[in-house]
Image (cartoon, helix red, strand yellow):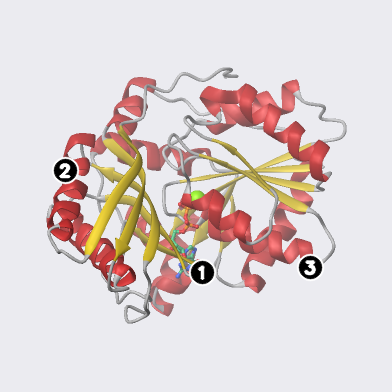
Amino acid sequence: MKIHLVGGFLGSGKTTAITNSCKVLLNKGIIASVITNDQGNYLVDTLFISQAEIATGEVSGGCFCCNYDELNSRIDTLKNDFNPSVIFAETVGSCTDLIAAVLKPLLTYRDSAIEEVTFSSFVDARLFLMHLMKIGLPFGAETNYIWEKQVEEAEILVVNKLDLLSPEESVTVKNLAKKVFPSKKLLFQNSLSSASVSDWIDVISQSGEKKEHHSIDIDYAIYGAGEANLAWLDEEIEFNSKDNSALKIAAEFIDNLTNSIMADNLPIGHLKFLLSYNNKSLKISFTTLTEMKKQEIEKSEKVGTVHLIVNARIQSTPEKLRQLVVDEIDRLQSKDNISIQEKCVSCFSPGFPNPTHRFA
Ligand SMILES: Nc1nc2c(ncn2[C@@H]2O[C@H](COP(=O)(O)OP(=O)(O)O)[C@@H](O)[C@H]2O)c(=O)[nH]1
Ligand SMILES: [Mg+2]
C-alpha cells in the first residue's frame, strides 16, 4: 500500500488534485481513498470528496502532526474497511514541518516493509511566481514564514494552477523554479485536468524508494504565530423561504460575505461554501488571489430550503470574522420572506502546534 502525504497552503489545490487522481486511479481499477484533515469540523472537502464516491476518513479538530495517533487509526480503518492500494492524506493548509512530524513518524511506527510513504507539497503557481520574483506575499510575516517553510521542505513540489498563468509567466516560473530549487522534483500542473494529474500520479507511484528525508530547521514560535494570525470559521446555515427564494438569498449571502472580507482587505486562505438544495449540491471556493467572478448559482431556481456549509480560513481575528457573518445574516434576516438559522457555529484561531512526535 502507498500512503501519499500531501501538503501545501490553504487553497493551493490539494483536494482538487487528490479527487481527480482518485478518479484516474479508480478508472484503472486501483482502489484509492483519502484522509482529510483540518483544525475545524463540518468540512466542505470531506463532503465534496465523499460525494465523488471515494472512501474517506477525516482527522478534524486538529492537524495530523498534533494528532498522529488519530491519523494512524484512520489509516487502519480505511485499510480494514476498503483494502485500498493508495491512501492520500491531505494535511491542513496551515501546517508545515511535515517531514519531521508526520512523514518520519509514519515511516518509523508503521510497517515500512509493506507500506511506502511519499510526500508532495502544492503551491499556487501565481503565489510561487510572486515568491520567485521576490514580490511579497499577501499574508502577514509569520504566515508567509509557514508558506515559505512548506516550499523549503517540499520533496516533490507541485506548482499548481499553471493554467492561471499566461504562457510567458509559465515559462518564467519554470525557468526560475529550476534555477532556485535544482534539487527538488518539480511538477507544473493543472489539477482540473486528468492528463495533468496523471504525471503526478506517475511520479508518486514510482518514488517510494527514496530513503533520505531531511527535516527542516523551523522556529515554532514564528510558526505558531503564523497560525494564530488566521481565523477559522465553520458553520451550517439553513435558509428557509416562504416564496421559494432561498437559493437567491443564499447566493446573496455568499456574494456579500466574500465582498465584505475583500473590502476589509483580509487575506483569504480559503473560503469554501457547499450549498445543498433540491437533491443537488454545489461547491464554491475563493482563495488568496481569487478575483470576484460571477457565481455559477442558478438564482432563479425555485428553492424552499438551502443548507449551506461555510469553511472560512481568513487572516483576521475570530471575533471580526464572526461579526462579518452575523452582520450579513442580520441584514438578510430583516427581509420578511426568509428565515435563517445558524447551526454548529465554531470560530477560533488554531492552537500552538505541538506535534505528537518530531524527528529532527
Ligand atoms: N484554475 C485552476 N483552479 C484550481 C486548480 N486546482 C484547484 N483549483 C481551484 O482552487 C480552489 C481551491 O482548491 P482546493 O482543491 O479546495 O484547495 P485546497 O485547499 O488546497 O484543498 C478551488 O476553487 C479549485 O477548483 C488548478 O489547477 N487550476
Ligand atoms: Mg483541501
Q: CA distance from mark 2 to mark 3?
A: 45 Å
Q: Nearer the viewer, residue 216 or 286?
A: 286
| Location of mark 3 (residue) | 27
Q: Is residue 196 above or below residue 31?
A: below
Drawn side of residue 104 relative to residue 268, left or right: right
Residues tagged 2 and 3 counted as in contact (Cβ below 8 A): no
Looking at the image, which residue is at 66% across and 26% down? Answer: 104
Q: CA distance from mark 3 to mark 1?
A: 24 Å
| Mark nearer the viewer, 2 or 1 | 1
Does residue 36 appear anywhere in the picture?
yes
Label 2 secondary element = helix
- The answer as to whether callout 2 falls within 8 Å of ligand 1 is no
Q: CA distance from mark 2 to mark 1?
A: 29 Å
Tell me the tag on residue 332.
none
Q: Amino acid at mark 1?
A: Lys
As drawn, the residue found furthest toward the bottom would be: 300
Q: Amino acid at mark 3?
A: Asn
Label 1 secondary element = strand
For disc 2, the neighbor class at 10 Å (few under 14, some 14 to 19, many from 20) is: few
| Mark nearer the viewer, 2 or 3 | 2
- The answer as to whether callout 1 falls within 8 Å of ligand 1 is no
Q: Amino acid at mark 2?
A: Gln
Drawn side of residue 114 relative to residue 228, left or right: right
Label 3 secondary element = helix
Q: Position of residue 160 (x, y in %)?
A: 50, 61
| Mark nearer the viewer, 3 or 1 | 1
| Location of mark 1 (residue) | 280
Tell me the tag on residue 323.
2
Q: Position of residue 182 (x, y in %)?
A: 55, 50
Q: Quadrant of residue 189?
A: bottom right
Q: Nearer the viewer, residue 269 or 43?
A: 43
